[in-house]
Amino acid sequence: MILNLLIVPLIAALFCQISPTIKVNRFSFVAGALASAVLGWRAVFFSSFEKTVFAMGGKLLMDPLSAVFVLLIVSVGLLSVVYGAGYLFREDSGISFPKLRRYTCFFHLFLFTMLLTVLSNNLGIMWIAIEGTTLASAFLVNVDDKKSSIEAAWKYLILCTVGIALALFGIILVYYSAVSGAAGESKDSLNWTFLLEHARQLNPEVMKLAFIFILVGYGTKAGLAPFHSWLPDAHSQAPSPVSALLSGVLLSCATLGILRFHLLTQAATGSLFSSHLLVFFGILSVAVAVPFILEQADYKRLFAYSSVEHMGLVVTGIGFGSPLAIYGAIFHVIVHAFNKSLLFFSCGHLLYHFETKEIKKVRGILRTRPFLGVIFFLGTMAITGLPPFGTFVSEFMILSGGFSAHRWAACGILLFLLVFIFAGFLRHASRMTFGESSASGHSQKNLWMDGVLLAGMVLILVMGFYLPSPLHQLIQKASVIAGGVSS
């Protein structure tokens, strides 16, 4: 099951690369994503729902926690592929066939590396997979070969590679702590399940130092402040389907890496050392995002800084440590993935219709593009945590869990910052949505792109009112693991 999940995107990447025509390329592109989605959904809800499944001698695993991220990768990946089938395969897209083949091939390789990241039980394999996500997605950021895109791709590549190098040093320290302690040297010394089982035998001081390196290294990839500087450039220059996957899923995959090491550090030290660091950097990320959201001139960069804010909320919820806050953090990962991908898809529509990424030049969306205007405005309000959307529920859970854990000051600061973020988004969204239209680009409809917008809007609306029982149980089991309690 696990191996099938990893093999399918590799096969799809190969077929995309060797496809002789654009039609065959698009078919391979969409068919591969659909096959991955069906396998992923089956694996999550029918195969590994009640137990942990291992593969490759214990080097890979799927438990309820990793299953949540598999669900996001294949689902948002499918939406991004379908949207891309309309967005990049238009006759007026300006993307040549060789570039399309490169794009579709690396897109499936990107899905493969993200799946490998969340399915890794071995910390070394996880590190390789996270570095692989950087290499694969760098080509996607630079799909059009423009000067600004090349610059953003190189900045993304260099900063994330430096961060991952620091994370490698943290992994080496964890390995040293394992083999020098009572756990001894073993072929499983880098397996997360083995380390967690022998966590009390790890050196607490070494584990604290290791977690700092991991937090900086994987925090760079997750877009946590102050390691986030690559994120606005990469998100603003990448095609909208790629931005959706980067923001909605990739950042969360890196956050899973931080969570795994947080659990190890917490169990090894028996203290709140890692929790305090997560809360600090989480609140710092929200605070850093505020001025950039309030005074932003580019709508894609606006949503990029929103991702910094939301990853900050997720790690803060994990740092709070109460069952409600952790459940809220995992639920927030899910609703953010679909909500933010919807907004970046909307950005693709805006760029298509208005031919600009400047906020001040986009006016009157609702007047001339009612369908897009309604979805863009509602999606923007949803990402601020406004009821009745799922982000309101998840943020309410995180803050309630923080109050129950007696983190009064942290929760008060978060509430204060969230008010400013709401005000900034309301100001930008209102000016862009209402008033006289400034549309100057294309007016024809695209069923691929419009269908994805509609599906995304339905998803975020439904999750604000109703959470299917299987999904609730999956999140509940994942939150038990994320809370450091054996299920």
Image (tube, rainbow, N blue to C red):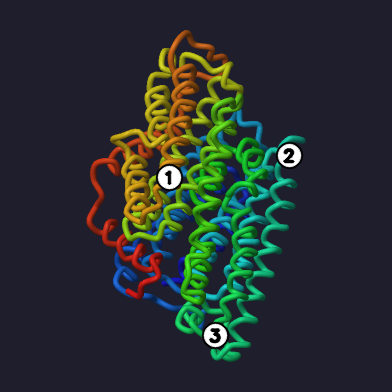
Residue assigned mark 2: 145
- Inspect the image, locate mark 3, and give the three-letter code of the amino acid beneath it: Asp
Question: Of 18 and 293, which appears nearest the observer?
Answer: 293
Residue 204 horizontal/vertical position (percent): 56, 77
Residue 281 horizontal/vertical position (percent): 55, 51
Q: CA distance from mark 3 to mark 1?
A: 34 Å
* Residues marked 2 and 3 touching at CB (< 8 Å): no
Please tell me whether mark 2 or mark 3 is closer to you in this view. 3
Question: Of 7 and 404, which appears nearest the observer?
Answer: 404
The residue carrying pointer 1 sits among few (fewer than 14), some (14 to 19) or many (20 or more) residues within 10 Å by Cα, namely many
| Mark found first going from the N terminus, 2 or 3 | 2
- Inspect the image, locate mark 2, and give the three-letter code of the amino acid beneath it: Asp
Quadrant into which the C terminus falls: bottom left
Quadrant into which the N terminus falls: bottom left
Q: Quadrant of residue 486?
A: bottom left
Residue 229 horizontal/vertical position (percent): 67, 43
Q: Residue at x 74, y 52 (%)?
A: 158
Q: Residue at x 68, y 58 (%)?
A: 163
Residue assigned mark 3: 188
Residue assigned mark 1: 336
Q: Is residue 448 visible?
A: no
| Mark found first going from the N terminus, 3 or 1 | 3
